[in-house]
Structures are given as C-alpha cells and as structure tokens.
Image (cartoon, coloured by chain):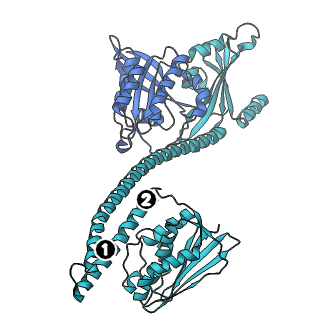
Chain colours: A cyan, B blue
Amino acid sequence: MVDASLSQTILADRHLAYALLDARLRVVAVQGPADLLPPDSLGRSLFDLAPELIGLEPDIEAVLAGQRPRFTLDWVNRETPSGETIYVHLILLPFHLNGAANGQPNGLIHLVEDVTASGLLQQALTQHRNELRLLRDRLAQQNSQLAAANAELRQLDELKSRFVSIAAHELRSPLTAITGYLELLTDEQSDPLTAEQREYLHIIERGITRLLTIINNLLDLTRIEAGRIELALRPYNLAEMVAWVVEELRPTLVERGLKLTIQAPPDLPPTLCDVARAPQILSNLLSNAIKYSYPGGEIEIRLSHRAQEGFVQVAVADQGVGIPLADQPNLFTRFYRASTASHTGATGAGLGLYISRLLVELHGGQLWLDSEVGRGSTFYVTFHSS
Amino acid sequence: MKEISKKVCLLGDFAVGKTSLVRRFVLNIFEDRYLSTIGVKVSRKTVVTPGPGDLIELTLMLWDLAGSEEFDQVRASYLRGASGAVLVCDLTRPETLTSLLTYADDLLRVSPQATRLIVAANKLDLTDQRRISQDELERVATRLNAPLYLTSARTGDEVETLFRHFGQMLVGEGG
C-alpha cells in the first residue's frame, strides 16, 4: 500500500502514467494521474486508450515480439474535457508479465508522458516563427509589387521626360524664327517704327525671352534628371565669372534701379567648375535677387575662400521680399515657388533653384540660404577650390 | 454493415489550413485565429460510404500533422501506417502548392501502401488574394494522380465533399 502510494506520488510529480498490457493488448494494470490514463481502463484495449496508435499495429507487434526495444509517438495533441490542449509522448516497451523473465515478452508497458509544459513553449515558439515567416513572405510579396510599380513609374517618368524634351525642342525652333524676324523689325532697316510699335515689339521680345528661359530650363531639367549632363570641371577664376554674369544682367539691374556691389579678395584661388554650368548657377541666383528686390534696393555679391574646407563660397544677398521659413525647405524642389514670390510681380516656373541645386551637386558643392520676410535673402553656393 | 478504419494524414506547409479543414469536417466549426500545430493531433469521424457491393461504415482517423519545417524529422514517424493523405495547399501562397510533391514523396517512402491522395486547395474564400491558377493546380494534381478540390474551411465549401470522396477512394470506390 505504501509502495503504491509512493509510486503514485512519483508518477504524479513526473506527469507520467503507465498501463500494463497483455499479449492481446488489453490493460491489466494502470497507475498514474487519472487525466493521462483513467483508472477504469482495466480490461480495455490499448487502442481505446490511445486511438492515435491505430494503424501502427505492425510497429506495436514488433515491440511485443521483442523485435524492437521500444516504440514512441511524440508530441501527440489531446484535448481535455475543458477544451485545453495537452501534449503527450506515447511510449511502448516490451514487458514480461507475471514474472516471466525469460523468452519473448508477453506484454507491453504503455507509458503516457505529459509534456504539456514544454509543448506549450514549443507551440508558442513555432507560432511566433510561423507568423514571422508569413509576415516575411507577405513583405517579400509587397516588395516585389512595389518594385514592379516603381519600374512602371520610372518608365512613365522617362516617357514624360522624353515628351517634355521633344515638346521643348519643338517649341524652341519656331521661337528662333520669331526672334530672327523680331530683330529685323527692331533694326528698323526696312521701315522706321513708331514709338508705340517699338514698345509692342519690346513686349514681344520680353515674352520670347521668358518663353526661352522656361524651355531651356525644361530641357536642362530632363537632361539632368536623365543623367545626360556631364560637367567638364576645370580651374576658373570665379571672380571673373561673376563679373561676366553681372555684365549680362546689367540691363535688368539698371532697369530696376538696383545697386550692386561685388566683394572679392584678391588672393581668391581658382575654382573647379564647368564653364557653361557654373555661370548658369550664378546667373540664376543673381536673376532671383533682381526679381525679388524692391526697386532701388541693393544687391551684394561676396566671394570668400574657405581654405580649411577647400571651398570658394559665393554669397548673393538682396534686400527684397524674403522667403518665409515654412517655404525654405521646399525651395530647392521642382516647380516650387515661395508664397512671397509674387510680391514684386516676378514670374517664374519654379525650376531655376531646383536646376541650380542639381548643378551645384554635380559640381560637388552646396547651395543654401538665409532669409527673413521683408528683409531679404542671401543664397550661398560653394565650389571646390582648385 | 462492414466497419473499417483508415489512417489518413493531412499534409501541407504551415498555415495552409489543415487543422481548420479537420475541424470543419469533424466538428463543423471554424476559428479565424491561426494556431500552429506542433506534433500531431488525431481526430476521427465515421462516415457511411458505398463499398464494393455494400455500404461500409468507415472511421477516418485524421492525422493532422505539424506543417512547420521544425517537425520534418519527426513527421516520418507519423506517416507510418497511413492509407492515404489529403494534401493541402493555400491558394494565396504559390510555394505551398509545389511543396505538395515533396510531401507525397515523403509519404510514399515511409508508407508505400498510402497511394490514395487527394488535393485540397484551401482558402477559396480569399478571392482577391488568390495567387494560384486553376491550370497550376491541375498540373500538380495530375502529377500526383489525385482528385482536386478547391475548399474553404472558413465557409465550409467543398470540405464535406472532399472527405466523402476520399472515403470512397479509401474503400476502393470512386478512386
């Protein structure tokens, strides 16, 4: 009695139950927790206790015949009457019933080992792993869909760029003819013009200049974005370059009554820049300073050498309308115009600063600004010193 | 009426809906929550099916096996003594269809008598997420020499029909 109680305690502690089976696989003894092997199992068939073993008769017979030392079926899921899942290992061992120690076994020990604790951990781990796998697969699928959409968008973008490029070229050709005939008229070689006619032609000329600027900007934009612009960086005197640009824009400066000063140290080193594109950047910054200055205002161009960083810096400062802080982060993006842009009646497509930024980046330099509404703006651009 | 029981394995990648198909067939219930199976869960359901010359009371022992690759090693021990298998794939995950060929090979290696196979292309209800065509399904089913059913454990579509057809195959009719 003490022994039975002892083994019952040990079996309960180990979450283990066993049944002894005769050669007909009928239960002749049972011990252990009742939820693993019910005490009323006596006389019942092994397959009643463990229906999971149906179909495995050849393996069981092999154990009974002493041909196999054991048979196990691991991680068998069972449901308790309350609906909870428990996990058990089912084990069959050969056994000599009634003390017969020799010869072929005449019975089996059927062990039921409750491994629910580790089973639940294993289940949770598998669950997490599988959910991660599903997530990974879903992400991979979304990635490939995004990649396909991206490729399609890129194709559309290229198509758009090609269209803009062709349209701009087609627009420029008739403008060349218009400009030519306009020059013939303004030369007054065939007939003298009245003051009114001269004024009309001047308006047409300004319109053509604006159109040409927009077309050239569009062409530049498509070229830069398609990576079709290559710069030839050579050492140039940036102060001289600034002077050319100022001379080009002097008529507009005069027209708007603006005063311009240039400060350049005499020992400014040569800078590495493209002879066509660097003046374009400077011209754009100076044009903006002119456009957004109030009549009679002052513009200052300051050149300096930042020896430690290896840059030459150009600052173009005006006393114009200024740019609100909220607009500044978007100022160098395409087609963006600051909310104060129309204050001086200036027009534009919002491409100049974007193109300038791309060109500065191609030069390996930087472009940024300081600005305050009503007090003016200073644009800074750097080029590598040679 | 003659009574027989047959062991049938449900095989397929993880999360294709093997457990849900069994629960729909045996208990006529469906739970949306995905719960990974570890090891094996054996359920049974008795159906009456026409056999050669007479009706047969067939007890299907349905072995719902873990689909996760962590159980690849022990899976072989669960396949012993099977008469056939329901091969389950998920219509929203193409890779689960090609896996069926491997599962069938594994089964026949362990249990050469398990020649009866049937394919359940599950999750038919997820129409807008479906990524396996009828042609692809038929190609695999033909290679496996197995009838094909498009099922939904969620709605119950074709689940009963599939298992009843499989029952007939197991007793030698309708194969």
Q: Answer yes or no: are tags 1 and 2 on the same subunit.
A: yes
Residue A369: name its quadrant: bottom right
Q: In the rendered view, does A324 fall on the left or right side of A262?
A: left
Expressed as whole percent of the image width and height from the top left, the position of residue B136 reads: 38, 30
Q: Is residue B47 in view?
A: no
Label placed on residue A208: 1
User: Which sits earlier in the primary sequence, circle 1 or circle 2?
Assistant: 1
Please state the horizontal and vertical placement of residue B9, each as a whole percent of the image: 49, 25
Image quarter (top left, top right, bottom left or bottom right) of the C terminus of chain A: bottom right
User: Mark 1 to mark 2: distance in Å?
Assistant: 22 Å
**Amino acid at pointer 2:** Arg
**Letter of the chain that mark 1 sits on in the rendering:** A
Q: Nearer the viewer, mark 1 or mark 2?
A: 1
Residue under the point 59% across and 29% down: B72
> Which residue corresponds to the image point at 48% horizontal and 84% vertical from the top-left?
A322
Q: Residues within 10 Å of mark 1 (few under 14, many from 20)?
A: some
Chain letter, disc 2 residue: A
**Residue furthest to the bottom:** A296
Which SS class for mark 1?
helix
Residue A105 occupies quadrant: top right
Q: Position of residue A143 (x, y in %)?
A: 48, 48
Residue at point 54%, 74% (across, down):
A241
Instruction: Confirm or deny contact between disc 1 and disc 2 (CB under 8 A).
Output: no
Determine which quarter of the picture holds residue B4.
top left
| Residue A223: numbered disc | 2
Mark 1: amino acid: Ile
